[in-house]
Image: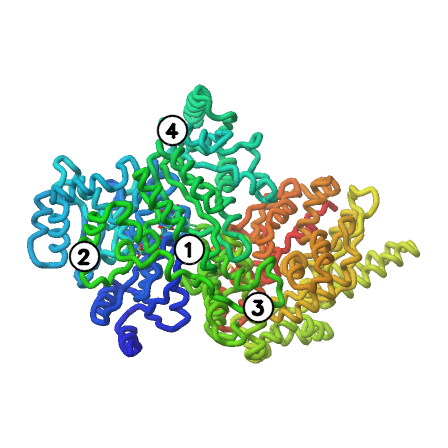
Amino acid sequence: MMDTQLKQLARDLKGDLYYDNRMRILYATDASAYREMPLAVAMPRIVEDIKKLIAFARTEKTSLIPRTAGTSLAGQVVGKGIVVDVSKHFTQILELNKTDGWVRVQPGVIRDELNIFLKPHGLFFGPETSTANRAMMGGMVGNNSCGSNSIVYRSTREHLLEVKVLLSDGSEAEFKTISPDDFHAKCDGETLEANVYKTVRKLLSNYDNQVEIRKEFPKKSVERRNTGYAIDLLLETAPFTAGGEDFNFCKLIAGSEGTLAFITEIKLNVVPLPPKEAGLLCVHFNTIDEALRANLIALKYRPGASELIDHYILECTKDNIEQIQNRFFVQGDPGAILVIEYTRTNRDEVIEIAKQVEAEMREAGLGYHFPLLFGDDTKKIWTLRKAGLGLLSNLPGDAKAVPVIEDTAVDVNDLPAYIRDFNEILKKYDLYSVHYAHAGSGELHLRPIINLKTVEGNRLFRTIAEEIAALVKKYNGSLSGEHGDGRLRGEFIPQMIGAKNYQLLKEIKYSWDPENIFNPNKIVDTPSMNTMLRYAPGHKTPAFKTVFRFQNQDILQHAEQCNGSGDCRKTELSGGTMCPSFMATRNERDTTRARANILREFLTNSDKMNRFDHEEIKDVMDLCISCKGCKSECPSNVDMAKLKAEFLQHYYDANGVPLRSRLIANFTASARLGALMPGMYNFMMTNKGMSKLVKKFSGFAAKRSMPTMYKTTLRSWWERHKEVKSQKSKVRSQKSEDRNQNKMMNDRGVRAEQSTVNNHLSSPKRVYLFCDEFTNYNDTEIGIKAILLLENLGYEVIIPEHTESGRAWLSKGLLREAKKIAQKNIAMLGKLVNEETPLIGIEPSAILTFRDEYVDLVNDDQLEAAKELSSHVYLIDEFITKEIAKGNISNAQFIKEHKLIKLHGHCQQKAWNALTASVNMLSLPENYRVETIPSGCCGMAGSFGYEKEHYDISMQIGELVLFPAVRKQAEDVIIAAPGTSCRHQIKDGTGRKAKHPVEILYEALAQ
Ligand SMILES: Cc1cc2nc3c(=O)[nH]c(=O)nc-3n(C[C@H](O)[C@H](O)[C@H](O)COP(=O)(O)OP(=O)(O)OC[C@H]3O[C@@H](n4cnc5c(N)ncnc54)[C@H](O)[C@@H]3O)c2cc1C
Ligand code: SF4
Ligand code: SF4
């Protein structure tokens, strides 16, 4: 029935309307624990579209849920109406007025991108959130967001000057500061706008209401107060409070969570950039209690932030390889550390302040160690602080750290006692969690670990919320300090501000929105907080038999690690790799989150025997290019490449494997054939007509150039090379062989250097080279250079017997075949390779399969061998870097020429933290300067960029950062890229030839 109307609506909009199952699933959740299937998802293009949506909602008795990045933690953007996503088309910065210090934006402008725009003007928008690289201004206003710097910059509300909105009858309205006279003038008339003014006048002029509001709302000293509509703040303005600042409805709209009006434009106050010098005073304490008392001293000296790191975080980071280096400033075994940021115009001023703070704390007997840190060290400290949350959100299994009591705020003076009481409650229920206190503003972030899939867990979710609500009321604090009420805390508002005041909120809501079309059931009239959750308590799912093992959990649990935080919505401007498809399209459906959501939904609720057999999953997975960016950058380490591969295997089990996937997976077999007649093969791939046919037959993009074969394979070159070497040592007739060798190498610009030039090793060290299929057939020249380089440096290089890497099979989801390959390689290499004689590889995507997928693929009886082998497998860049560190290779062996190298890292290499090795290796020649291009994925991603339907998006990804960065380099700058696909993509996208780092180092050998 509704389908007909939706169809008509879709036709009427300039933007898009989706009401298919797939899109509804993707918008059924946010970063909270809630889930509700919306009726549809709209992406309006113009304001007129939103008006049409409003008219539709009124006629069809449905609702609209405004949404930007969807990172809300209290279920604000979950609901059964139409989710209206303005993150795609309402992204303009409209006007900047530097003189008066304001900027006018559309709601879909990302907070950090706004600040990138403002920076050259010496300005910025102060309030921040931990999600600032994807959270948008509409959402920041909706939730009245703020962050660790709120003691200086307060919350979004304090910077919201004006808004343009659509009211619930579709009329346009503007809200800004108005004088008392104007306020009364606004009350005249019968429009909806006049009505909202009249209602607020009636309610706030009432003396009893005024008394009740002043009595029941959180203490004035609690700066962070996102409980209910901010009528307490409106009450303090003229005309209700003589001498108060002028009335502005923006105070109410900030934090109204899309329940009152649809915002189309936002005017924000902007401020001068903060002083340049920031120092972190990291005071060590024996207990949290001491730290919180010392916090009161810290606050007297105007810090930018005062944040608590508790003992639990410090413990978690002790054995974490990545975090150990960030603990450099920790002394002893502190019970808590207070990280206090002081920002001043110069370092001396910061040092002076820190001295005074230390003196006062010491006098009060608080704190035992007071390191003050600047520059890059400060980044390490913030990383350490965040680590605890990462470790928590990464918990395997059904019990998760859930947002439920994660946002309380009390007066900073009450904080020590409050946290003591808080912990008593947690102890009662046997719960514990990391304490994240924005100590400077009395805000406590804490997520207890609860299994919401069980009836008991669901009950505990509620019980703990009730108890903490009562505690917050005892301290007259705010149940929400910054995250908002949504449907999580709405139920407790009557308790927090009193039943009478709650009635006022309802009157306010329905004066704005009589037909309840704007984001219903948030803030007021919310359903029970433990209903409509992602996990129905007691719901059972079948055991999933998978080819990969998912480390102590099943595939569904791995997908469930996604908590919706939306880090995968960050854009290319924030750097990193995750998630290239979203960066290119800016569509929610192309995020890692969308992929995790769709998989979770069908694995949980499908009624098919094979729960993977759904087109919707395939659709949403389609643009995942398996770059592994999420494996390392998602705070919950969701490994979508692995999930996609497993999904594809099961999907193909039901639907058959497409011809192109077979062709690609069988790359090695076809390359072997091609290698029999490389000339013919290359002709077919490069001749215009022939290659057109080949591409058409195989489903590759006509515009894409095809890789060619080298005239020999690396393996056969090495066999000959070995022979030549042994003959030489036998007959000692070096000269003539050298000439032959030289001749062959010179054909392709490769020098046949003799080994042991400037050799630092006392005896040759043996290394095994993994002759991956890409280097063997296509990039043979790089393989030859790698061998010659290593021999020159004094290593004996052996290519052992092994089979292909399996990367092509993995990328196409043919996991059972990949598994056979992995097992074969482990069997062939397991006994050979050890720390003394490691296995090194040239192509990152191939060699890293040993470290990554093999361990999760092989049968249990090979698991230990796979793990052991993986610990002795290195990228050649890593191996050389290690040897440099041992003193076995030095810069004396290389030329002194000056060169600038721009390095684009391979995604899988980055996911394994192995990019630094390439930088270190390339920096070895004394005058080589290496700069990494801040690119994410190149867009090629194995075969993805060859495929005809993916060519355009592949090039779009390349255009985000990589291509422009390469294009602007001078001719003499060397472009380095360890990945074979990346080099191909750079060539196709820019016409520049990129080199593997090992080639560059080989060419830098001193003669
Ligand atoms: C890991 C994590 C850390 C976080 N840290 C912080 C933090 O430090 N500080 C903080 O304050 N918050 C934090 N949050 C919460 C959240 O990120 C912020 O509230 C953020 O500002 C929301 O922005 P968004 O674009 O995702 O908004 P959304 O979630 O899309 O929307 C937020 C609200 O705004 C409304 N809205 C959006 N657009 C409009 C519009 N055009 N008209 C009317 N209403 C609209 C929505 O209906 C919704 O009620 C965190 C969340 C996560 C997951
Ligand atoms: S995939 Fe990771 S980064 Fe993206 S929303 Fe889920 S948890 Fe966050
Ligand atoms: S593997 Fe890459 S493309 Fe796929 S979801 Fe993860 S970050 Fe995105």
Residue at x 42%, y 61% (from the top left corner)? 534
**Disc 3 on helix, strand or loop?**
loop
Q: Which residue is mark 1?
A: 459
Q: Position of residue 162 (x, y in %)?
A: 22, 48
**Disc 1 on helix, strand or loop?**
helix
Q: Which residue is mark 4?
A: 296
Q: Which residue is mark 3?
A: 544
Q: Looking at numbered disc 2 in the image, what kind of residue is underneath it?
A: Trp
Q: Position of residue 593 (x, y in %)?
A: 46, 60
Vertical position of residue 242 compared to residue 262: above or below: above
The quadrant of the rendering that contains the N terminus is bottom left
Mark 3 and mark 1: Cα distance apart in space: 28 Å
Asked where in the image residue 774 lies, by quadrant, the reply is bottom right
Mark carried by residue 512: 2
Pick whichever of labels 3 and 1 is earlier in the sequence: 1
Pick whichever of labels 1 and 4 is earlier in the sequence: 4
Instruction: Name the side, left or right, on which 795 lies relative to 628.
Output: right
Pick whichever of labels 1 and 2 is earlier in the sequence: 1
Does the image show residue 689? Answer: no
Q: Looking at numbered disc 4 in the image, what kind of residue is underneath it?
A: Leu
